[in-house]
Image (cartoon, rainbow, N blue to C red):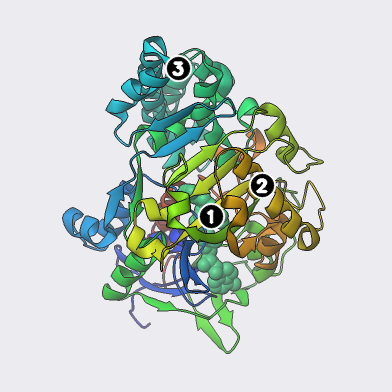
Amino acid sequence: MRSRAPRVAVIGAGLSGLAAAAHLRATGVDVTVFEASGSPGGLVRTETVSGHRFDTGATVLTMPSLLVDVLGALGVGGDEAHGRLALAPVDPGYVMNYADGSSLSIPHDAAQIPAAVASVFGAQAGDGVADLLRWLRRVYDAEFDTFIDRNYDGLADLTDARTRQAAARLVGLRTLGGLGGAVARHVTDERLQRAFTFQALYAGVPPHRARAIYAIIADMDIGRGVSAPEGGMGRVGQVLADALVDSGVDIVYRTPITSIRRNAHGRVTAVATDDDVVEVDAVVATLERDGVARLTGERPRRRLRYSPSALVVHGVLPDATTSTWRSGHHTVDFGSAWSQTFAEITARRGRLMSDGSFLVTRSAVSDPSTFVTDGLESVSVLAPAPNLQSAGLDWDRIAGPYTDEVLGTLASRGYTGIDGMHVLRVDHPKTWARAGLPAGTPFSVAHTASQTGPLRTANVWPTSENLVLAGSATVPGVGIPPVLVSGGLAAVRVADLLRGPGGGR
Ligand SMILES: Cc1cc2nc3c(=O)[nH]c(=O)nc-3n(C[C@H](O)[C@H](O)[C@H](O)COP(=O)(O)OP(=O)(O)OC[C@H]3O[C@@H](n4cnc5c(N)ncnc54)[C@H](O)[C@@H]3O)c2cc1C
């Protein structure tokens, strides 16, 4: 028998795949990452469109400590990791603009948030927010290690002492009720309630219907601050990929996996590309569940419910124009409507927002040298929209007129000149569908009660113990922090498997 390191294929060089590869490499495994596109990062990327740079995927980077952990697994120390990622605090982390004309800038440093709130909403509101931030941190502490950064194997794990203790803490924190009610216990002003509940939408759940356990997301972004890498979000994937290559991991680009081969017992034996078959001991797949099923040749039975999608407009404007706006790197512009807005985009029969709330991104606020070219600033506007599962809208026809409507609405709300933006690219549900994302959403499977935690698609493929999932479709879920965690969880699964009886060769 030939003695060699076990060989693992990771499918996808998005952040989950890169994280999985790093943690696996740290265990001495021989890892190859196969990526269909020409660069790392997946949905976290910075692209050049007609000579201008845009963050065309994720824009809000939270919990950078998870990135430092991934680099740490590859032997890159904390200071060196911070140097490579070149992160700057985004301050204010968010600007929140409200329909009544009021505006709140949320400082990066949580200690300064109560004073900032007090200056706009009064001293009592400032005290309420200070309480709220403490409660959010307690929710995070009770939830993260036990319910998020952990592999579950069955009922025993759900009832062990550690889980019971954490669950009791969450009950004590009253997180089993609604998110809106929990936040309202601390802040009475509806505008502040919006500021601390809109994040539920990141998990694909309307804030008014979310459980209070989703408050953890507000701790991750407002509570811990938002960061921006120099050069744009695309730097993150590139830094991880470079460190992987330095540590001996092969990343092969423009090489989609076309099938996952298994033996008669369901055990994965190889992955195939267009012109090669590579024998492996295990696979980490970071695709959506239906994408993995296509590769194994199976047809999944359970129908999944997907998060809402978005229309994302990228364009340029003179920086003299954008400087007149009341805005920051990340500006949430709220319409008057609230629960109605989310009902519209998340309903089983969804429709466009009638009084929209939008995310306006000006990456140039943090990094003008990357995002201003010849006096023209890159600006992106994200308008949440129903996915193709809930509304069969003809996006190829309506994307243009809807873009005009969104920009017109923003112009009327004080973003003077934005309706004259030179639009260079519009992504919409059909764009994401063409990229292979189910239901035309890049936000994956919604975190509804029946698709969260132990009920979410598990990270071990049901018919193949050595096919492990990472990424937004599996546990713990959608967004940069969860997918980085998912990579670590997948690596633990594979390492256990390779160590166990029958592991390796
Ligand atoms: C517009 C937008 C805004 C967002 N905003 C935020 C935000 O502000 N903050 C936040 O935290 N998150 C945000 N997200 C979500 C976040 O980007 C994703 O949840 C996360 O990046 C998903 O990572 P992943 O590794 O699971 O998947 P992906 O990034 O999708 O990576 C999967 C990779 O697999 C590759 N692949 C697919 N099929 C194959 C195959 N057959 N063979 C080989 N390779 C294959 C793909 O090319 C891709 O590179 C946003 C996403 C979008 C699109």
Any mark on residue 6, and which? none
Q: Amino acid at mark 1?
A: Ser
Q: How far apart in space, not on screen, are marks 3 and 1 (Cα)?
A: 37 Å
Residue in the foreground of this view, choosing between 154 and 258: 258
Q: Earlier in the sequence, mark 2 or mark 3?
A: 3
Label 2, secondary structure: give it.
helix
The N terminus lies in quadrant: bottom left
Which residue carries the number 1 mark?
A: 380
Ligand 1 closer than 8 Å to the CB at disc 2?
no
Q: Residue at x 78, y 57 (%)?
A: 398
The C terminus lies in quadrant: bottom left
Q: Earlier in the sequence, mark 3 or mark 1?
A: 3
Mark 1 against mark 2, which lies toward the viewer?
Answer: 2
Q: How far apart in space, not on screen, are marks 1 and 2 (Cα)?
A: 14 Å
Residue 33, position in %: x, y?
A: 44, 73
Which residue carries the number 3 mark?
A: 173
Relative height, residue 245 to residue 134 (above, below): below
Residue 323, position in %: x, y?
A: 42, 48
Q: Amino acid at mark 3?
A: Leu
